[in-house]
Amino acid sequence: MDMLFPDELETSMKTTKVLFGILTITLEQLTQSQGQGSGNLLTNPSFEQNAGHAIPIGWARFAPPTAQTFGDYWIENSPPVAHTGDLYWKEWGASYGGSNNVAGIYQVLSSAPGSVYAGSGWFYVNPTDVLGQSSFAWVEVAFLDSTSNILAIYKSDNFSASIGTGTWFQYQISNACDVTQPISLGDPYFTNSFAVTGAVTQLVAPVGTTAVRYQFCYLQGVTLGTSDGGSCYFADADLEQVSTLPPTPPNINAQPQPVTVNAYDAASFSVTATGTPPLRFQWSLNGSNIAEASSSSLTISNVTQTNLGAYSVVVTNDLGSATSSDAMLSMYPFIVTPFTGAITYWGKDATFSVGAWGTGPLSYQWFDNGVAIQNATNQTLTLTDILAVN
């Protein structure tokens, strides 16, 4: 996916220009080394190296082109509530035009496939300058290829004033996102938001990675038609490389299991797989791919006869693929079209039938006043020359 940033990004090291969504990374940022187990990789993570209305040393800022020229951001300690040290980053909304906008700061460092990271950041809301009710902030880590396309992205939960004010809160970057499922945050200039697929304990650089980007994001929302006021404090950004894993193809550790349900119940299958991310999933039924079934789990709601059969999933990454074993979805017998009786004439023939669902083979037995009718074991029953005894 292409990274889209505003036309100009300010940085205290040099100005970085972005044209047509292609990011030019400053040499100072990209050449920062990432040794395994080297502690926090970020430059100036607590914002102690400069102060005032300025971009923190070692960081770059992004904002939409609709942002106010002055820029509502500071490095300050007023009131004195820094988490550690003396200073923190303070971000207001970038634009007050009555629509959502996303702004923030980031660093880009060199990386390589298989590098494993952990990341976090600290947030604070001043009780006298409360973040608006539709606004929130988060931190994220994205892995980029040589042309700055996003290969994989992870983010923290969203932080808002509803979490609490007057206290610092640490947020871990622990949610994996699917770069094939973009979601809109209401800011047309911020297109790097994607659906969260689940929690993770490691942030792993996928095949093709050349850089890693750590980013603080602040979404200024709109409440009752008016842009939110208030601000968010940010401090002690942290990005650490904890290990290096060799690139590996997918391996399925836990196979999907067979399921038997009643008609119209829900049925779920899941698979557990490892391998160099990003892992991609495609579920199939009886060998045919299921549309939009592309996560590690699959749920079928309101199961009917057409849903029954063998389910499997193919897991792929850039190094190979793995196919699961089949898991059968079965159904207990269910009469979907019941027999409701018939009116006929003396001496005539009459045919009765019933519609049934279930995993076959299904067997039938017709009864007359509670007594099984001999040889009446088909889906239909025909009586000839109707008499009173019938």
Image (cartoon, rainbow, N blue to C red):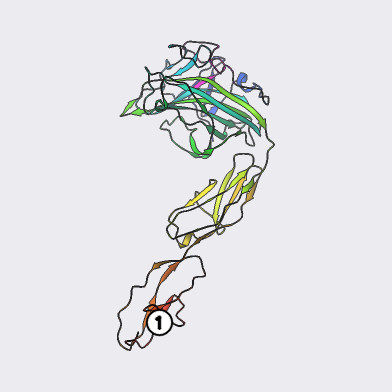
Q: Residue at x 54, y 14 (%)?
A: 12
Instruction: Give x and y (percent) for residue 37.
Output: 67, 25
Q: Is residue 60 magenta?
A: yes
**Residue 184 seen in the current view:** yes
In the rendered structure, which segment of residues is drawn in magenta? 39-61
Closer to the camera in the image, 242 or 33: 242
Secondary structure beneath disc 1? strand
For label 1, the residue is 382
Q: Residue at x 61, y 55 (%)?
A: 325
- Res 349 quadrant in image: bottom left
Give me the residue at 63% from left, 47% from top: 253
Residue 107 location (% of width, % of height): 56, 22
Locate the C terminus by quadrant.
bottom left
Q: Is residue 304 above or below residue 216?
A: below
Above-or-below relation of 306 to 71: below
The image position of residue 58, as x and y in percent, is 57, 17
Q: Position of residue 366 (x, y in %)?
A: 42, 77
In the displayed structure, does residue 281 sit left or right of residue 264? right
Residue type at tag 1? Thr
Which one is nearer the viewer's eye here, 160 or 114?
160
- The overriding secondary structure of the stretch rendered in magenta is loop
